[in-house]
Image (cartoon, rainbow, N blue to C red):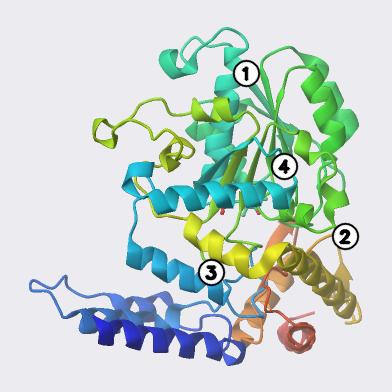
Amino acid sequence: MEDLFQSIVQSAVRYRKSLPDRPVGVRASYDELKSLLDAVLPEDGESPETAVRKLMAGVEQGLIHSTGPRYFGFVVGGSSPASVAADWLTSAWDQNAQVYASSPAASIVEEVVARWILELLGLPATAGVGFTTGTQMAHLTALSVARNSVLRDRGWDVDSDGLQGAPHIRILCGDCCHATIHTAVSMMGLGAGNIREIPSDGEGRMRLDAFRRELEANTDPTIVCVQAGNVNTGAFDPIGEIITPSKNRGAWVHVDGAFGLWAAASPRFSHLVAGVDQADSWATDAHKWLNVPYDSGIAIIRKSEAHLGFKTARCAYAGPAHAAGRDGSQWAPENSRRARGFVLYAALRNLGRRGVADIVERCCGLAKSFASQLAQIPDARIINAVVLNQVLCRIEPAGIADLDSFNASLASRIQQAGICWIGTTRWQGKTMLRISVSNSTTTGADVSLSVAGVAQSIKEEIARTDR
Ligand SMILES: *Cc1c(COP(=O)(O)O)cnc(C)c1O
């Protein structure tokens, strides 16, 4: 075991040190990668060294080096050394964070981390906090509690009676809301077809006039989903202006703040989420902007007693609840699970308040710089107001008929070149480049190098496109 673990540490160190110099994307095809990894399940097991060595050799060419400084796809963030080290220990300790009795350490660490997160995000200290795989499951948690709560207000008990015959619930959200809202609503049995999408403005923010009209249109139990940080533009719904009338009508307000909610941790950007603390629930990720490894979402619910009512059944073998210590499984969908709090504990001690604000501010500054440098490239047009860490850019050379195909093909070329990784998105009916700056190791030099790479790829793409 010792040799195996030591050699893995060395490999991991070599890997992480090499990140700035590696081509960021993957060049091998599906067939090539499959042939490296596919094998007959061995009848007799291999040694631990062989099994792990084969894994490493097999995946090497298929890794996207998204934890390096020039990956700008999706909103992936990176993972700090402290968080990776704590993640290894989480596996080595292999705790079940289900109930206090299955890991007192995990339980108390989650309690402390929950408090820190509420403080950082400026949310009510008495709110319930659950640790989930990601924002998708944080939505499922929070929206399930919301569903139960708005129906309880009408005298309906979802926990015992389910949804059959229950009053109709309507869900209001912007037409630019994230797909995971739809998925959560359909998984909850409310029907994605019952979502009323409110038209948004050019930056993807819900339009207030349209929202008010829809809110007042009927008196059904209502859940309103607002967005803090649009995945394309980084824009924020007018959260405070939406919450007040919603609450006046007894609606539940849920905030999708997968990455944007972290703006609350920065004095310079917290104005973007003004009023957000008045909502009823919040879903966010640590594995994006907080730069910890994957498997780290957070569900927060203002009324912790409602949150606790989310799961009422208890495994016989779990024993009675501890008088003081929390049971992690009561606050999130899973029963047995990894002790997610350990990583957050180390990451937040390592960063401190200042460090979290710094990540947000630095990434936003670099996104602005990315946009202004891209704007210098002939034919490049910046599409969004860069209010956060997201940049939309479309390249529109004269004489090219199909600009959507041109931009899509350009993105592949940029990815193949390997200097940086930039994806595409569809925004307002058009294909364009989408850049997310969310890795705390990205520097100004990385941005300049990436812009130069993009400029070169544009020249090459124009040269091969028929005009
Ligand atoms: C990433 C993201 C989600 C989904 O988060 P997961 O962690 O992938 O489940 C939801 N909403 C927004 C705005 C996001 O950026």
Q: Residue at x 55, y 77 (%)?
A: 81
Mark 3–mark 2 Cα distance, whole angstroms, equals 25 Å
Q: Which residue is mark 4?
A: 123
In terms of secondary structure, where does tag 1 sit?
Answer: helix
The quarter holding residue 177 reads top right
Within 10 angstroms of label 3, few (less than 14), some, or many (20 or more) residues? Answer: many
Q: Residue at x 42, y 39 (%)?
A: 327
Residue mark closest to the camera, 4 vs 1: 4
Contact flag, marks 2 and 4 (Cβ < 8 Å): no
Determine if residue 323 is in view.
yes
Q: Which residue is mark 1?
A: 150
Determine if residue 402 is in view.
no
Q: Which residue is mark 2?
A: 268
The image position of residue 395, as x and y in percent, is 82, 73
The image position of residue 141, as x and y in percent, is 53, 36
The amino acid marked with disc number 1 is: Val
| In the rendered image, the vertical position of residue 193 relative to residue 75, given as above or below | above
Within 10 angstroms of label 4, few (less than 14), some, or many (20 or more) residues? Answer: many
Mark 4–mark 1 Cα distance, whole angstroms, equals 21 Å
Mark 3–mark 1 Cα distance, whole angstroms, equals 38 Å
Within 10 angstroms of label 2, few (less than 14), some, or many (20 or more) residues? Answer: few
